Amino acid sequence: MHPKAIDWIIMGTYFAVVLGIGATLKRSMRTSTDFFLSGRAIPAWIAGLAFISANLGAQEVIGMAASGAKYGMATSQFYWVGAIPAMVFLGVFMMPFYYGSRARSVPEYLKLRFDEKTRGLNAITFAVMTVFSSGISLYALALLLRLLLGWDFNTSVSLSALIVLVYIFLGGLTSAIYNEVLQFFLIVFGFAPLVLIGLKDVGGWQGLVAGLHTVARSRGFAPDAWLSTWSVMGSPHENPMGIDWFSMAMGLGFVLSFGYWCTDFLVVQRALSAESMDSARRTPLIAAIPKMLFPFLVILPGMIAIAATVHGGASGLTLPRQADGHLNYNMVVPLMLGRYFPNGMLGLGLTALMASFMTGMAGNVTAFNTVWTYDIYQAYIRREASDAHYLTVGRMATVVGIALSVAAAYVTHRFNNIMDLLQLLFAFVNAPLFATFLLGMFWKRTSGHGAFAGLLAGTAAAAVHHGLTLPARATPGIKGGWIAVMHLYPSPMAQNFWTAIYAFGVCFLVTVGVSLATRPRPERELVGLVYSLTPRQDSSAARWYRRPAVLGACVLGAAVVLNLLFW
Amino acid sequence: MGLDIRIPVGALFSVLGLLLAGYGLHGGAALAQRSLGINIDLWWGMVMLVFGLAMLGLAWRARARRR
């Protein structure tokens, strides 16, 4: 890959616009609400695009392309099953409580609904997680820049951290959201030509289908294994993921997806910044529309690359191999950028990747500074202070958050295993969350003690399940089985889905049990926080397509059609 | 909010579109070799320019309406 002046000019133009946005927005950051929640004034379509972009970090882009090559069309289940239903549920059913309660963060909702200890547990684990996730983004970016441009690790880390720092420090959440919108369009415009040229390379859609049949046969699967979703999930041995339909639907489609999209403050924060209740509810629904189509942008390149590698294409594109002889799937995107894009487009593709790294990091930093300021600093350190004081604290938290991310990037660089361990711990903490929110929002009897005990028990269940099971062909340790190996799963993904299912189940049962044994909060305190005690949200929008329920039904219908098309 | 998002998006894509299309026009066939015979810089640059101008147009219309 040999960038020329034109590529650097394109990247430079993007960075100038990013910093310009921050500088322009500085004037409108007057209160802490401006800084942390964009003054609750963002139109639904902007919040919606930011909502998906915040999740579409570059690791996701590179990882989805890699999975597309490894598993084929079934990867799109992470979108059509693992995102769309949860996003619709968030918009139609949950947003009235998040937005309507005027909570400024997800942990603050837990405080309003349950009690201080449940909020504290969630706020602290979330703050730690965001700092590390942002550090991992930074680390991955530096690795990629070293690979593509030959940049030094220190230079990449400090330069990207500095740019993110400047634009958030100046423009707060609004800056982050605007950059997410920018990134959304950059990814669309940067990747669409990659797919088009790639399809031409393998002989169009027909050629891709023929190529993927060869791929599937060469690996000992039915010819359609790389082109289907549900039809090859009768048993885990019929598909390269090693997943059966039940763990796909329950583990990914229900527990993991609802746990992430409906409770993670990183995405929910984008909806809380919307200008009205209707806009907040429409945010995830609007986001769901491009989200449904993203597989064609981010997964298809992987499918093209594997077809070209195994079956052959016009340009002779071939995935490189790792030292152990396995194909290096993570190279799909860098390889295709370098092979298909002439200078000029190369600059655009690199800009799109850098933009998604930086928004991935910025999303975590904005969520961190909000939770730190409202749920930790204001709750436990200094309760009554002026709004201007909290605005300053928020700006300082941005600096500290980024400094910690840089530190985390270096820790990851030095000790890769520590990162695997931490990500595993986060997965244990996150797995049971949705049970707590589901019971909290829809069962008025749920008590604070019940929620807290349920969360702890769910996390413990996740850890124990992981300690007792192991994916096939893995050695006990970080992959599982560190207590004893009682059960073997066909793949790490299957183990992961079942860990989530157990954590959810245990959290649900313990929360119900402890709630029945403890005293619930008086009903008058729960108005606006629980479904049965809150007046129905009648949408004020006159046009049918602006009503959340109608929009939600249309989105779900479209997702069903996509599932049937690629059954 | 102080800043209509369509202005920076429109400005960025108009400028990038012009840069790409200009470079594609100038580079011609030599560039197209890589992308299987398509002068992708030229064509995609023009698509981006149209998108950028459309965004700026929407921002301009919204501003005129508010007055």
Image (tube, coloured by chain):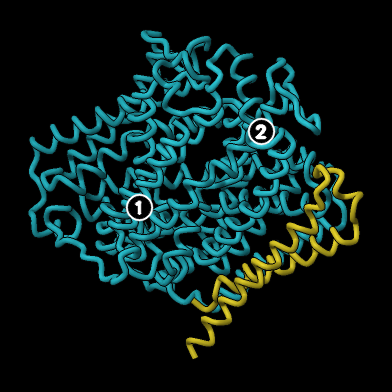
Q: Visible in this render: residue A389?
A: no
Q: Nearer the viewer, residue A303 or A19?
A: A303
**Residue A356: percent from the left, percent from the top?**
61, 50
Residue denoted by label 2: A304
What colour denotes chain B?
yellow
SS label for mark 2: helix
Snapshot quadrant of residue A256: top left
Between discs 2 and 1, the one toward the N terminus? 2
**Residue A89: percent from the left, percent from the top?**
30, 48
In the rendered view, tell whether residue A562 sits above or below residue A395: above
Give the residue furthest to the front.
Answer: A206
Q: Quadrant of the N terminus of chain A?
A: top right
Snapshot quadrant of residue A104: bottom left
Q: Chain of mark 2?
A: A
Q: Chain of mark 1?
A: A
| Residue depicted at 41% across the width and 35% down the height | A564
How would you rate the neighbour count of disc 2 (Cα within 10 Å): few for under 14, some for 14-19, many for 20 or more?
A: many
In the rendered view, tell whether residue A41 sits above or below residue A283: below
Q: Which three-letter amino acid code belongs to the residue tagged 1?
A: Cys
Q: Which three-letter amino acid code belongs to the residue tagged 2?
A: Ile
SS label for mark 1: helix
Q: Visible in this render: residue A206?
A: yes
Chain colored cyan: A
